[in-house]
Amino acid sequence: MRRRQTAPRTGGLLRRLPEAWRRPLAIAGGVVAIAWILIALAAPVLAPHDPLAQELPRLAPPGPGHWFGTDQLGRDILSRVLYGARVSIPLTLLLVALSVLIGGLLGACAGYFGKWVDETIMRLADLVFAFPTIILAMVVAAALGASLGNAVLAVLVVAWPAYARVTRGLVLGIREREFVVSGRLLGFSAWRSLRVDVLPNVTGPVMVLATLDIGTALLLLSGLSFLGLGAKPPSPEWGAMVASGVEVFDSWWVATFPGLAILTVVLAFNFLGDTLRDALDPRTARAIKERAI
Amino acid sequence: MSPTSAPSKDREGGAAPDSRKAVRGRAARRHPFARFLVRRIITALLLALGITLVTFILTNLVPGDPAAANLGQRAIGDPAIVAQWRADHGLDKPLPQQYLVHLSGVLHGDLGQSQQSHRPVADDLAEFVPATLELAGAAILISLILGVGFGVVAALRRDRLPDHILRVTSLFGISVPTFWLALVAFYVFFYRLQITPGSGRIDPGMTPPPHVTGLYTVDSALAGQWDVFASAAGHLVTPALVLALYTIGLLTRFTRSAVLEVLGQDYVRAARAKGLPGRVILFRYVLRPALVPVITVAGLAFGSLLSGTVLVEAIFAWPGVGQYAYKSATSLDLPAVMGVGLVVGVVYLVINLIVDVLYGVIDPRVRLS
């Protein structure tokens, strides 16, 4: 607390971050997140078995040779969990990136152009917000047909409005600022003004939201797969693996390890996002400052 | 909807409208709450219309011919029968007209027929809604009590051990996959330790209480069947706790920051300087303003509870809308999935409307702005 008081009250993102990153939660989150990304990259080297090969004894409990046990088809669960990182993590990151891109652009247009553009986009966003997330994602995924690609599309439909709202709010605050107005008076096109003057100024907060959202996106995606609306067997997707564990209930290891994989990834990104938000949220910063006086 | 769309804009010119505007302005000032209420209800109705449009469009997105799905093999070979079937179901009309037919069906309680149960989706849903309401109601109650309590403790003990523990716990709560936690809880507490009752709403062999509300705990208490009540409440605890974990985490975090913000206000410092006892400051000066926004979050959290029921009910064999949705989704029974989407969307909308109105009742600034 004392240390935080000495930190500059305002200033660039970078000057504030190092202080925040020294907190135990951020370090734990960072280490686990990086570890999972490395696992995703190195899965073929790390995995002791082929994730799809049905060559081991069926439903063998965890033990030497197969540390996480085997599933009902005789596949090594450890290898499947490791390979699962190659399915879930890149897809989740892609999903969040696409949501930021689509939601951010639509929100920026809504905030910048106002009038009917704003009305149309934000009413669409309201409509999405009117549904509980997984219900709408489920409805979309069911309509499109069960596949991992369609599940990503379904989560995208649910996820973009949050970015649109935040970006719109930020753009509304910036669009009347002098440097934007003077740019327009100099004859710059709306697109240039948006791209050069406005968007770079809203990326920070939107990125925080994105980090916070990675965990939620993974939960949604694996939830859809659990419902049978995402990954198709034999893909080693974590949600689908948990679902297959429901069928062999007393072999606890079948569902436990993929579930733990989801939990650790989501927790890691939530630790990171939480730290980021605390470091950048002026409300929390103000509360901390006032309490410290 | 934005406040600018309020009906105060007068499009007619001249002096008369000006005076009318003044009168209306005065009326609005006199009945600000009525105006606020009407605006909220109109917004909700428009959104409900939007929900029907979304489900209609999604149903039409599906590749494949509904006639082929509903008619038998032999009938599909006869173009006359197919044409007749399409005409009967309004499918030969242009899309906007089809939407109107769909909308009038929805307004008359016709949500289509489930391909799985071969019953009207509306009948299926009516049967399953009370079970889900009981589960979600218990979960939101648990979340409010624990979430707000934990949030207040975390804020008061900021940066000390309880705060750190609660912070990690609440982050855990929002990070754990609900469907997995349900499975683990069921396995550990029922299958291994045998300290909780198994799946379903009451013990097998027990007769459900006479139907009044459809909520077994309430109905059994009304009928004075305390053994049934104990069984129903026992069956409710684990799934409700699993379902509540996410919202507990959410409410803890939100309450903590809301309380912290109020604690930094000048009037709280003044109250403290005046020598008021800590309990009075907490309950009278801090909690009242801090908990007002928590209501909104609780309303939004209800949405995640409704989402969670889909994943939790499947594991606990809880005969509610969630399990119905799960079964329909896995068998791609589209009318049933759309029915669930529509009903849950509207329930969520109504709950948020109530929350909005409640917020307006409690905080006059909201309805006056």
Image (tube, rainbow, N blue to C red):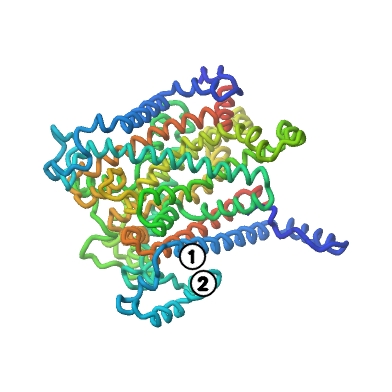
Q: Quadrant location of residue B334?
A: bottom left
- Answer above or below: position of A6 versus B250: above
Label 2, residues with CA under 10 Å away: few <14, some 14-19, many ≥20:
some
| Image location (x, y in percent) of residue B175 | 38, 39
Q: Quadrant location of residue A201?
A: top right
| Image location (x, y in percent) of residue B157 | 46, 29
Q: In this view of the protein, which residue sits in the foreground, A285 or B275?
A: A285
Specify the subunit that label 1 lies on: B
Question: In the shown orientation, is residue A67 left or right of residue B150?
Answer: left
| Image location (x, y in percent) of residue A250 | 17, 48
**Secondary element type, mark 2:** helix
On whether disc 1 and disc 2 are found on a single subunit, the reply is yes
Q: Quadrant location of residue B344?
A: bottom left
- Answer above or below: position of A75 versus B343: above
**Secondary element type, mark 1:** helix
Give the residue number, with chain letter if any, for mark 2: B98
**Visible in this render: residue B276?**
no
- Extreme residue in the left direction: A57
Q: In this view of the protein, which residue sits in the foreground, A159 or B294?
A: A159
**Tag 1 near tag 2, CB within 8 Å:** yes
* Mark number displayed over residue B44: none
* Mark number displayed over residue B56: 1
- Answer above or below: position of B86 versus A204: below
Q: Mark 1 belongs to which amino acid?
A: Phe
* C-alpha span from label 1 to label 2: 9 Å
> Residue, x 55% and y 40% (percent of image)?
B290
Question: In the shown orientation, is residue A137 left or right of residue A121?
Answer: left
Question: In the shown orientation, is residue A108 left or right of residue A222?
Answer: right
> Residue, x 71% and y 34% (percent of image)?
A180
Specify the subunit that label 2 lies on: B
